[in-house]
Structure formats: structure tokens, C-alpha cells
Image (cartoon, rainbow, N blue to C red):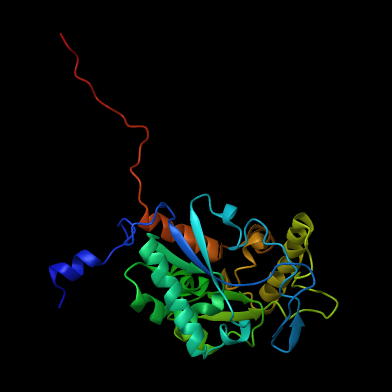
Amino acid sequence: MNTPQSKAKRGSLRVPRSNFPYYGQTIGIIMLDVDCTQGEGTAVIGGDTLNEAGFTRVPGDVGNASTFGFSVQYKLLRNLQINEVITRHPSERSIAAMVDAAKAFEREGARAIATTCGLFSVFQTVLANAVDIPVISSSLLQVPMVSLMIGPQRKVGIMTANSEILTDQHLAAVGIDRSVPYVLWGADQRPVEEDVWIFDELDPERRTRRLEKQMSLSAQRMMEAHPDIGAIVLECTNMPPASMAIQQATGLPVFDVISLIKWTQLGVNQQRYSGAMQHRYRDVA
């Protein structure tokens, strides 16, 4: 039973609990620590060895703070390997690190918490239970809502980096099961000559152009294979720089982690509206 004290505790519209000397960071974003210097650091994902370090987080990427147009703050998960975080069974120390970061954001006055990987969906319940502010662990949270938007006769196209890594456990953690009509499409489903992930591309303009071209081609192939798709949700948080190009190529609504974070930001940071109104005045004799 909720007591007056517990009701007062919940909610995000508080000053920082620990009297931090800064304030105004609406969204706190949890990020895996990656050294983004060229040529350093690799990860094995789905059997592919990728240079995860040498890339630029261009505008539109969740890791670029200028993407949002409002204040965000990042916290890095240090000394963790990518394979122990994105798996369907994350390690105990990765769970502890995620919870610690979420609680720190709450103490410092963030109004909601997001992450920088759609595969962090497996942390949704544990993080939401750990803090009293909203948690959006993954872009995949949008899939059930988008499905209701377009109706059961159409499917949601879920675009991910590698369809073998995104498991049923990742989907079920955010309410996606077989009652939600969807198609899972990996960017790895491509001709071998196409190099979708641009981890070695440091020039921002070239990275954006290549990402737009290759993700558009991937989306078109998905549509050719599944013409009953009615909307697209991008799981991967590196894909949103190509969202407009994907939409132009398919003609479909495209949702990503940026759309979810912006939607959440409005919910926790409502503003008073102003605009034109028509007034009627009585004639004065």
C-alpha cells in the first residue's frame, strides 16, 4: 500500500538529492565505455570481428549530445566488455554497474534515464525497479505502441545490427511477443561486398552518407521480402543518423531511440503553451 511518504518519494521533479552544484540535465544516458581512437579496440559480435573504437558519433547518434536540442548527461560503464552487457544473460557485475549508474543519475537530478544500446532492453525491469524516475532501456519499447498505431494487419519492421544477437529474451523484456506482428531484419543480411558498419570511418560527413546509403538499401531489401510492413523501429542506437534516408527510401514511419528519448523528455519536462487565440469583445456604447 502506498503511504503519503512513498507517494512523495516517487517522481522526477525534485532538486538533486545530494545537493549537486549543477542541475538541468533532463535525460541521463548510460553508455558503455569505448575508446573512440582509430584502430584501437575490437569486439566479436555474431562471429564478426569489428573495430568498435575507430568511429565518429555523428549528429543523430545517441552518443552525440547535440542530437537532442535539450540537456543530456552521460555516464560510462567502465571495465566491462561488450559481450557481457548486450547478451540475453548479462553478467552480475554489468547489472550492478547499470543499477549504480541509474541511481547516480537519480541522485544528481536527472528526470529520466536512457541507454545507448537497444540490446540493453534486458535491463529494463531491474533498472525501473531500482529508481523512482522513468527508465527507457531500449528503442524496442516503442514496438508494441507502434504496432497498435498501424493495426494488426501490418507488421513492425525491427531493424537491428545482427538478427542473431537480438533474441526473444531481449524482445520479451520490453513486452514484445508473438502477439505483436513484427519482422526482425538484421543489417548483416546483405551482400558480402557491402560493409554496413562503418566503425573505421572517422570523417563525420562520409560516415553519415555511407550509413544513409547502406541502411536505406537494407530497409528496401526488408520491404521487398516483407511488403506487409507498416512502420519501422530501429533497434540500434547508431542507426538514427540514417532515419530520414530510410523513411525517404521506404515511405514508412520510422521510429528510433532519438524519437523515444524526445517523447520521454516532453513527458518529464512539460512546458506551458502559448499561441494565437480569438477573443470576442463587446461593443462599448
Above or below, 41 against 283 in this view is below
Residue visible at 52% across and 63% down?
A: 74
The answer to whether residue 176 is visible is no
Residue 115 placement (x, y as % from top left): 51, 70
Above or below, 38 against 64 in this view is below
Q: Nearer the viewer, residue 75 or 201?
A: 75
State how many labels appear: 0
Query: Which quadrant is the C terminus positioned in?
Result: top left
Residue visible at 13% across and 72% down?
A: 3
Above or below, 226 against 17 in this view is below
Quarter-of-image position of residue 18? bottom left
Above or below, 80 against 233 in this view is below
The answer to whether residue 207 is visible is yes
Residue 235 placement (x, y as % from top left): 58, 73
Q: Nearer the viewer, residue 252 or 32?
A: 32
Q: Residue furthest right?
A: 193
Query: Which quadrant is the N terminus positioned in?
Result: bottom left
Q: Nearer the viewer, residue 80 or 215?
A: 80
Residue visible at 53% across and 89% down?
A: 88
Quarter-of-image position of residue 155? bottom right
For residue 242, side relative to residue 196 (left or right) = left
Q: Residue furthest top?
A: 285
Residue 207 placement (x, y as % from top left): 76, 61
Quarter-of-image position of residue 83? bottom right
Residue 119 placement (x, y as % from top left): 55, 79
Residue visible at 54% across and 66% down?
A: 257
